[in-house]
């Protein structure tokens, strides 16, 4: 009896967490991204989180789904590998055209969810950790900078 009551308390706490709320507040590609962000940071707990967030969750990964963490490609887009509904892997699918677009999408989600400052900071830390590689030659390169055209020896 005690174990059942304890499980209900834990499930309730998880359902009220910003992580579970973010999963239920998103749909489509945004949910796919959020699930990948959470899976990257929480690894083993993400399945439990999904059971708490979704009453109909059966333990399997909903397709389409992201199969890797995000990377910044040479053009500055945020990309990840995606598995489609048929199980085929598509490499480096563009999720956000720029870092700014990604930041703004997470900011709008945090605003819509009315996250506290603490939860907002934690969500952005998760998102930042999710981008695991930067494939640009020089991430600080700004083509609009007049000094960028200067040749350095």
Image: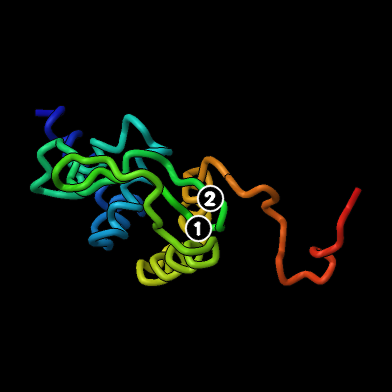
- Tell me if residue 6 can be seen: yes
What is the crowding at mark 1: few (fewer than 14 residues within 10 Å), some, or many (at least 20)? many
Q: Which residue is mark 1?
A: 77
Q: Are marks 2 and 1 in contact (CB under 8 Å)?
A: yes
Q: Is residue 124 above or below residue 40?
A: below
Q: Is residue 42 left or right of residue 131?
A: left
Q: Quadrant of residue 51?
A: top left
Percent across and percent down for residue 15 are 24, 50
Q: Is residue 124 left or right of residue 8?
A: right
Q: Which residue is mark 2?
A: 72
- Nearer to the camera, 13 or 152: 152
- Element class at badge 1: loop
Identified at 84% across, 66% down, the residue is 147
Label 2 and label 1: CA atoms lie apart by 6 Å
- Nearer to the camera, 51 or 9: 51
- Element class at badge 2: strand
What is the crowding at mark 2: few (fewer than 14 residues within 10 Å), some, or many (at least 20)? many
Percent across and percent down for residue 49 are 26, 41
Identified at 36% across, 32% down, the residue is 43
Percent across and percent down for residue 9 are 22, 41
């Amino acid at each position: 009896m005690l174990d059942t009551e304890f499980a209900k308390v834990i499930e309730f706490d998880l359902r009220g967490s910003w992580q579970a709320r973010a999963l239920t507040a998103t749909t489509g590609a945004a949910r796919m991204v959020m699930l990948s962000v959470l899976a990257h940071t929480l690894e083993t707990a993400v399945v439990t989180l999904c059971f708490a967030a979704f009453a109909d969750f059966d333990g399997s990964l909903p397709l389409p789904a992201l199969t890797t963490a995000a990377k910044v490609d040479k053009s500055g887009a945020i990309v990840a590998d995606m598995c489609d509904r048929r199980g085929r892997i598509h490499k480096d699918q563009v999720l956000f055209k720029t870092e700014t677009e990604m930041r703004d999408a997470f900011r709008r989600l945090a605003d819509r969810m009315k996250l506290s400052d603490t939860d907002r900071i934690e969500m952005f830390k998760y998102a930042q950790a999710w981008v695991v590689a930067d494939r640009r030659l020089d991430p600080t390169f700004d083509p609009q900078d007049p000094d960028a055209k200067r040749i350095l020896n």
